[in-house]
Amino acid sequence: MSASMNQNDSYTSGRLKVAVVGAGPAGVYASDILLRQLKEKGEELGLGIDARIDIFEKLPVPFGLVRYGVAPDHPSIKYIAGALEKTLANPALHLYADVEFGKDITLDELEERYDVVLFATGATADRPLEIEGHGLKGVYGAARFVEWYDGYPSAPREWPLEAGQVAVIGGGNVAMDVARILMRRADDLLPTDIPDNVYEGIKGNRARELHMFVRRGPAQAKFAVQELRELEKLPGVQIVVDQDDFDLDEETIEKAGEDKLTRQMLGELYAIRDMSADMEDEGGTDFEGKPADRKYYIHFYQMPAAIIGQDGRVSGIRVEHTRVDPDGNMSGTGEYTEYPVQAVYHAIGYKPAEVAGIPYDFDAYTLANKGGRLYSAPADEGGRPIARLYATGWAKRGPVGLIGSTKSDALETISNMLADLAATPSRGRLAPDRSEDSTDKLLASKGVHPIDFAGWKKVDAYERSEGAKVGRERIKAIDPDHLRHLALD
C-alpha cells in the first residue's frame, strides 16, 4: 500500500463525503467531474473510487440558470437540462432542494458532516447601473426581467410592458435575450415552457421600437453566434444598424481574426448588416420580406451617459459616442445623442451572490478564491486558503463564459480539491460525523422538508402533462408552494 493510502485510510473506511451548495450547471457538472476523477485516479491518490455527494439548492427545483436564467426560446436549453438531469439521476448524488444555505443549514453543520464543501452559488443579482437617472421608474435590471419571463418562484407575476419605445444597455448575450423577448410576439413563444402569466404579459407588450446600446464596436461585442442567428429570424421585426459602424480598419479586423469565436461573431454581424440594408431597401420588412411592425436598432459606439426623466418616470436616454482602438480601448468623444424611450433595461453583468460566512472579493465580483480554493480574503490582500472549502462556476470566476467554461472551471477546482485531500495527513482533519443519514436527521429536527430527485421528477411529470393538454411540451409551474405540493405529495 502506498504512503498516501496509509495516510488517508479514513477514506478507505467509507466513501468521501462532499457537500455542494447550488444545483445549477456549475454544481452538477462539478459533481459529475468529481465522480469521474475518483474513478480514474482515486485509488492512486488514496481517496477511494467513490463518493457520496449531497447537493443543496435553495429553490424547490434544480438546474439554476438553465431553468431560470436562459431565454425560453433557446433550443439548446432542452439538451442542457436533459444532460443535467441525467447526471442528477446518479445514485451517488443526493438532491436536497428547498434547503437554503445559511438558513436551513449552516457552514458549521456542513463541515461537521462533509469532508469538503463546494460552493456553486451562481449569480442572480444585477451589477448596479451608476449613471444619472438610474432610479427613475421604468429602469429595470435584466436579472429581474429574466426571472419574470422564466417563472422564477419569487418573481412578480406581472411585468409592466406599456412602453412603446425601450432601450437595452449591454453588448452581451443577456442583453440579446432581453431584447429578443421584448420584440417577440406572444404566440412565437408557445412552443416553449413559458408560464401562462408570461404569455399573457407578452401578449399585451406595447413595445414597437427597441434601441440596443453597445459601448464598443462590432469587433468587441460579446454576442454568441447562436444569439445573432436567433436575432436574424424574428417575425415582424426590422433590424436597423448604422452601416458606418462596420467600416473597421485593417488592424481591428486583424485583431478580431486572432480569436475564432470573435471572428465568427463578426462575420455574423456583417451578415446582419447586409440583412438590415435589404430590409430598409424593401420598405421596412422582416427576415421573410413581410411588412415589419417593430423596429430593433443596434447602436455601436454609444455609451449611456444619463437616463432622462419626467415626473419621476423614464422619458429618454442620453448616450455619448465613443471611439475604440484596435485593442478595444474605449474613450468618449464628448458628442451626445438623445433618444425618446419610456423604459430602460440594463444588462451590464451579473453580480455573483455573496454567501453567509464566506469572504467576498468585491473587485472581482466573486467569492474570494484562487483556483477554486476559497481564501480568507482576496489573495492580493494577503488572504490564505481555507481548508476544505471550494468554489466553482460564477461564484469562482465571475459572471462570464458559457457551458464550456463552466466545465473547464469545474475541472480545475476538482483537481485542486483532490490534490488537497490526498495531502491531508490524518483522519482528524476530515468530517467527524461520517453517518450517511446525519443530514436527513438534522433537517428533520429543524422541520425542514427537502425535495429530492424523485420529487423533481413529479414536478417534471406535472409540467409535461399540463403542456400536453394544449399541445405544448411543457408549461412551467412557478408558485413555490405549488412546487412543494407537487414534489412532496
Image (spheres, grey):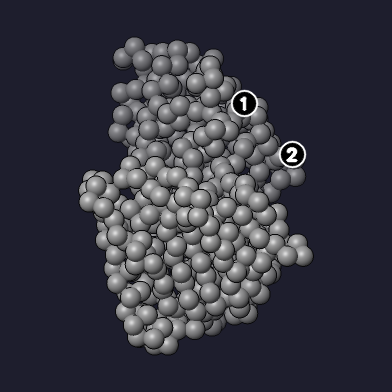
Q: Quadrant of residue 318?
A: bottom right
Query: Counting other residues with Cα less than 10 Å from the Cα at mark 1, is it few (<14), some (14-19), or many (20 or more)?
Result: some
Amino acid under disc 1:
Glu
Q: At 50% across and 21% down in the image, what residue appears? A: 380
Which of the image's four quarters has the C terminus?
bottom right
Looking at the picture, how far across and down is residue 353, in whole percent? 60, 41
Residue 280, position as x, y percentages in the image: 37, 80
Q: Is residue 323 above or below residue 461?
A: above
Residue on which disc 1 sits: 112
Sequence-first tag of 2 and 1: 1
Q: Nearer the viewer, residue 271 or 94?
A: 271
Could you say which quadrant of the image residue 274 lies in? Answer: bottom left
* Residue 143 in sight from this viewpoint: no
Count of numbered badges drawn on the protein: 2
Closest to the observer, 108 or 337: 337
Q: From this view, report whether residue 173 is shown above or below residue 357.
A: below
Q: Secondary structure at mark 2?
A: helix
Residue at coordinates 34% horizontally, 22% vertically from top-left? 45
Whole-percent x, y for residue 354 in the image:
62, 37
Q: Is residue 457 left or right of residue 2?
A: right
Q: Is residue 43 left or right of residue 309?
A: left
Distance, label 2 to label 1, CA atoms, is: 16 Å
List the residue tagged with mark 2. Answer: 445
What residue sits 38% from the left and 23% below the top? Answer: 419
Mark 2 or mark 1: which is in front? 1
Q: Amino acid at mark 2?
A: Ser
Say above or below: 337 vs 210: above
Residue 436, which numbered label? Answer: none
